[in-house]
Image: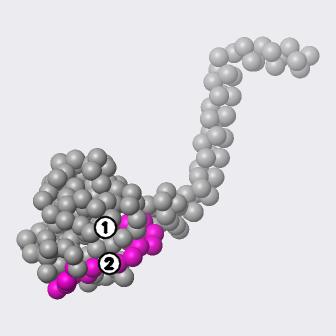
Amino acid sequence: MAAPALLIAARSKTVRRLVLAVVVFIVVLLLAVLSPLFAVPSILGGASAAGAAAGGPTVVGQWGYPLAGNYTKSDGFGPRHVPNCALCSTFHQGYDMYQGCGATIYAAGPGTVIRAGAWGSFGNAVEIDHGGGIITIYGHMMWGSLMVSQGMAVVAGTPLGLEGETGVATGCHLHFQVDVNGTPVDPAPFMAALGLPLK
């Protein structure tokens, strides 16, 4: 006798709606209980772990390295002499980093791309305005490798292009330059103050 009563109840719209409401409630309750278990690893890992997992650079707060992983410093900021390079400046206004031809170069901080393309001695380059008078320049990238264009908004870790030797360069490297209020400053203490010490 119980089976026919269940069949009749199952045909009732009210009973079906009640069963559906109970099932939805149980699913929502399970999601609410289980979702923190999936969120905890990403919260604990932070942006740096996410960037590292994706092959991107280390990011601290809103700023990060312009290269992911290990690199070699070739020239720092200040006076220099480059053998066999008559066009090379005697006062270097940036920080040269070598990771290898074709290595991905990333935006160091949030801002707007104000230049992307051929730019004199920088070769194929990107310039980013970060606001507050801070501008970064990424020089000597491979021709045809730029991944951004003028007017684009970027954040730390946005891929810009690939390491090359365009413009006045004596080998593949990234020329990373920081200008504050129109004047080039040493990128090493600038980045160190952001928790991102350079070599």
Pointers 1 and 2 in contact (CB under 8 A)? yes
* Disc nearer the start of the sequence (1/2): 2
Q: Tell me where residue 36 appears, x and y as whole percent.
A: 58, 57
Indicate the secondary structure of the residue bearing disc 2. Answer: loop
Horizontal side of 9 relative to 1 (left or right) equals left
Q: Residue under label 2, please give it.
A: 74
| CA separation in Å, label 1 and label 2 | 10 Å
Identify which residue is drawn at 52% across, 60% down: 53
The residue lying toward the viewer, choosing from 88 and 115, is 88
The magenta segment is 57-82
Please, what is the three-letter code of the amino acid marked with disc 2? Ser
Circle 1: residue type: Gly
Name the residue: 17% across, 86% down: 79
Residue on which the image places disc 1: 171
Q: Position of residue 87 (x, y in %)?
A: 13, 71
Q: Residue at x 14, y 57 (%)?
A: 119
